[in-house]
């Protein structure tokens, strides 16, 4: 009897060994091709082939993928501290960020590219941006937020706006120090520095209102987020139907009665929505006469750190809130589409807290929370809002160059550059 010929154990073609063949197919992530090709092998050789392929995939190829693209997509879950711990002790933190795909990005003025974007009909021509510096530090416990306006101007804010076709009307920095002798809150709960924050925001409200009445785009640079009391009050006094897009890790919907910290940078929306009696808070009595924000006018995006009472307010009032869960589930494109559909044809105001971004890309801020917006998600929010042609005012807040919790020499530059780039996107900058 003729003996059956054994199937060849070698593979013809580009791969001349079983190991190369297994590695090639595992790299292609093509199990079907591996199954078909392995039919040319004897049973024992086929078993060894699969063992080698599985070993290569799980112990060589897959870890390599995890250390590059998968890790980059998961970078929102990393804080600067965890990035440092994952690196070797001798590796600088800047190199770690570069390894996560966070280096080599064109930033600053060189990334500004003017394109034709729609201008809101309620703004006068030629389009003019009124820049207001609001160096407020009393809404939270850290010094340094008063340096935000200065750094953004020095980094090229004026040049960026003129490059985008805007005329610039500089209002300078408001002086809040003249109000340091105002009264303090003594009611239930806590409301720290209410006198200086409230009276300082009255000054800001009057400046914002004056610029908005002239038909100018109002760009306010802070400062901590308590300055939203003044910017929202000023805008609502001129355009009471304005939709508010709150880009933040926090809801800032507390009141003196519900706040656990008493810091007023966590209360501007609580005051502006009438959730507390302004007449009982020294320095904030003037807010009682300002038009209030209705629940349908407010939309959150980027939330991930919400207090218990704030959560109850959001559900009770029916406020639209897109947390990082929604960004993960739907993607930032669909999330912004739903957000803007809800806003309808209202004039828009954006209040952008830089802590909405992940601490990996925005480390110099006061209340950092892991799991924030990625670099592109942060930019896409700005680009999508600007494309509506209805944005008439915005705040950029909580940039704090003095806060370098990881002692990274580039933290200030990274945060300021990111803030400037987001401002440029909101004012019309595009990639192409």
Image (tube, helix red, strand yellow):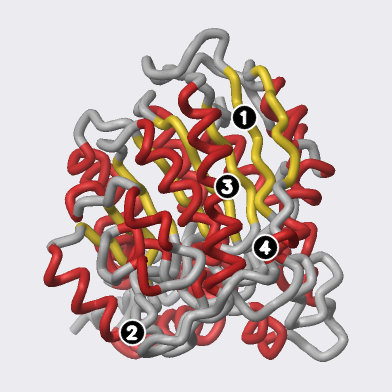
Pick the front one: 11 or 7: 11
Q: Is mark 1 on a helix, strand or loop?
A: strand
* Crowding near the residue tagged with mark 2, few <14, some 14–19, many ≥20 C-alpha atoms within 10 Å: some
Alpha-carbon neighbours of circle 3 within 10 Å: few (<14), some, or many (≥20)? many
**Residue 52, percent from left and from top:** 46, 85
Between discs 2 and 3, the one toward the N terminus: 3
Taking the spot 32% from the left edge, 31% from the top edge, the residue there is 347
Which is in the foreground here, disc 4 or disc 1?
4
Q: Which of 147 and 304 is in front in this view?
A: 147
* Distance (Cα) linking label 2 and label 4: 24 Å
Q: In which quarter of the image is the N terminus?
A: bottom left
Q: What element carries label 4?
A: helix
User: Which residue is tagged 3?
Assistant: 204
Residue 93 figure quarter: bottom right
Residue identifier under label 4: 179
Q: Name the residue under label 1.
A: 130
Task: Decide which of tag 2 and tag 1 comes sooner along the chain.
Answer: 1
| Distance from Cα at disc 1 to Cα at disc 3 | 13 Å
Residue 251 occupies quadrant: bottom left
Q: Is residue 208 shown above or below 253? A: above
In the image, which is nearer the foreground, mark 1 or mark 3?
3
Name the residue: 73% across, 59% down. 178
Q: Is mark 2 on a helix, strand or loop?
A: loop
Q: Which mark is residue 252?
A: none
Q: Are marks 2 and 3 in contact (CB under 8 Å)?
A: no
Q: What residue is disc 2 on?
A: 257
């Amino acid at each position: 009897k003729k003996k059956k010929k054994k199937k060849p154990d070698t593979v013809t073609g580009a791969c001349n060994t079983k190991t190369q063949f297994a590695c090639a197919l595992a790299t292609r992530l093509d199990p079907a091709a591996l199954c078909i090709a392995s039919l040319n092998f004897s049973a024992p050789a086929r078993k060894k082939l699969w063992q080698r392929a599985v070993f290569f995939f799980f112990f060589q190829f897959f870890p390599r993928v995890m250390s590059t693209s998968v890790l980059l997509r998961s970078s929102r879950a990393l804080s600067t501290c965890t990035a440092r711990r994952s690196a070797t002790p001798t590796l600088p933190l800047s190199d770690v960020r570069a390894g996560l795909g966070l280096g080599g990005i064109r930033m600053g003025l060189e990334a500004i590219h003017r394109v034709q974007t729609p201008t809101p009909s309620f703004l006068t021509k030629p389009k003019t941006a009124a820049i207001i510096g609001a160096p407020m530090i009393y809404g939270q416990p850290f010094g340094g937020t008063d340096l935000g306006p200065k750094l953004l101007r020095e980094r090229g804010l004026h040049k960026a706006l003129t490059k985008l076709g805007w005329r610039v009307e500089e209002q300078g920095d408001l002086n809040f120090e003249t109000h340091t002798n105002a009264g303090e809150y003594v009611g239930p709960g806590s409301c720290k520095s209410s006198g200086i924050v409230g009276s300082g925001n009255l000054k800001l409200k009057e400046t914002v209102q004056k610029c908005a009445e002239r038909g100018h785009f109002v760009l306010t640079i802070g400062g901590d987020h308590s300055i939203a009391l003044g910017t929202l009050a000023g805008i609502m006094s001129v355009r009471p139907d304005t939709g508010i897009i709150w880009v933040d890790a926090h809801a800032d919907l507390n009141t003196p009665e519900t706040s656990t910290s008493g810091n007023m940078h966590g209360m501007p929306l609580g005051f502006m929505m009438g959730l507390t009696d302004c007449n009982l808070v020294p320095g904030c009595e003037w807010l009682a006469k300002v038009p209030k924000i209705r629940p349908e006018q407010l939309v959150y995006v980027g939330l991930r750190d919400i207090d218990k009472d704030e959560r109850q307010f959001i559900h009770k009032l029916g406020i639209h809130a897109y947390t990082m869960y929604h960004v993960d589930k739907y993607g930032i494109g669909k999330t912004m589409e739903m957000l803007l559909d809800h806003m309808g044809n209202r004039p828009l105001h954006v209040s952008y807290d830089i802590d909405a971004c992940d601490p990996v890309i925005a480390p110099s801020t006061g209340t950092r929370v892991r799991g924030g917006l990625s670099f592109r998600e942060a930019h896409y929010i700005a680009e999508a809002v600007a494309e509506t042609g209805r944005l008439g005012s915005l705040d950029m807040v909580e940039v704090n160059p003095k806060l370098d919790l990881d002692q990274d020499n580039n933290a200030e530059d990274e945060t300021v550059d990111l803030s400037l780039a987001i401002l440029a996107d909101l004012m019309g900058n595009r990639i192409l």
